[in-house]
Amino acid sequence: MMRILIIRLSAIGDVVHTLPAVHLLKKYLPGCHITWVVEQAAADLLCGYAGIDELLVSQRKEWLRLVRTGAFASAAAQAGAFFRRLRNTEYDLVLDFQGLFKSAVLAGLARGKRKIGFANARELATLVYTERAPAPDFNDHAIKRHMGLLRHLGIADAQAVFSPFWGEAEQASTAGLVSNSDGASKSPLISVHPCAAWLTKCWNAKKIAMMCDSLQKDFGARIVFTGAAAERDYIAEILSRMPAPALNLAGRTSLRELACLFAGAALVISMDSGPLHLACAVGTPVVALFGPTAPWRTGPFGARYSVVRKELACSPCYRKKKCQQGHHRCMEDITVEDVLQACAQYLRQGT
């Protein structure tokens, strides 16, 4: 049996973009055993995922927190247990899809006959590889770039196939969460994910409220907001601007439940975020708002999506916290009507 170790620690969107590798490895290397190393934030997404035979969860952030608080023994014990488990198996292939120092440490410590990463990996990661795959084109979509490691193995198939992310338990819990939302069950359910890890990726709260108000009036939509627990207050601010009620599920869903919720929605509206890519993976129509990042590199994928973006000379700039021009026009110039027009094509088609 061929044993394969996949290293893709974070973030949620990057993990989603790497998942098609599981299907292709199983297809072209039948009988292989796949172990995936991931950090805690995205671990829930991979639990029980078809094709992943073993999951190793790195608690790196927790270990660092313990060190900062002086709990050195506890940090050492937890990290030691993880690394012993990592080294317990000798792998035929170690595939580092991350290409950073933190992933290279794991690739270096793992017992592997072949350790493969990209030739343009950063932070000296290439020093631990036994083989370096050709650097992918920077402007290719992330899924295509990730598949470069498989092309190095002779797997030229670029098909992006995803297995279900949820089971019966998530179906039941998700149904319970949305059953109390206002509106008849036949009304289209629209999930809005208004937040992103970068401040520069976010849209105006007032415009989001106006957009949702129009969707409720024009399509009788049931609006469900999603996000992390820390984003609940921001979503509450949006809700306070809306005449009609909507559901705030920020911090109330696991990633598997979120995938199930998206799969049952008529439409997902999202900023450039990890959940955006999860919505694409389950095949739901997506309207994505892009500003400081490049949708051709890390945007939505599949057959049913629309990108709302303003063509500005300064975009994409990849600034995380503040617009370098001082105006943030890449997001501020997006109008409510721009987004509603993109939404309407899916809601009127009923697809």
Image (cartoon, rainbow, N blue to C red):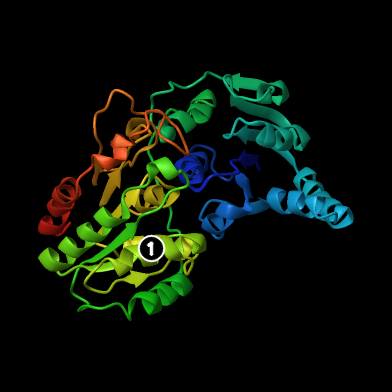
Residue 280: % across, % down: 34, 49
Q: Is residue 226 visible?
A: no
246 to the left or right of 78? left
Residue 175: % across, % down: 37, 76
Q: Quadrant of the N terminus?
A: top right
Residue 342: % across, % down: 17, 47
189 to the left or right of 131? left
Q: Residue at x 52, y 39 (%)?
A: 25
Q: Is residue 288 shown above or below 221?
A: above
Label 1 environment density (alpha carbons within 10 Å; few <14, some 14–19, many ≥20): many
Residue in front for this viewpoint, 310 or 204 = 204
Q: Residue at x 40, y 34 (%)?
A: 323
Q: How many numbered marks, from 0 up?
A: 1
Q: Is residue 58 shown above or below 291?
A: below
164 to the left or right of 244? right
Q: Quadrant of the C terminus?
A: bottom left
- Badge 1 is on which residue? 235
Residue 125: % across, % down: 67, 26
- Tell me where residue 222 sits by quadrant: bottom left
Kind of residue indicated by mark 1: Ile
The residue at the far right in this view is 73
Q: Is residue 122 shown above or below 292?
A: above
Residue in front for this viewpoint, 271 or 36 = 271
Q: Is residue 61 visible?
A: yes
Q: Residue at x 51, y 45 (%)?
A: 15
SS class, disc 1: helix
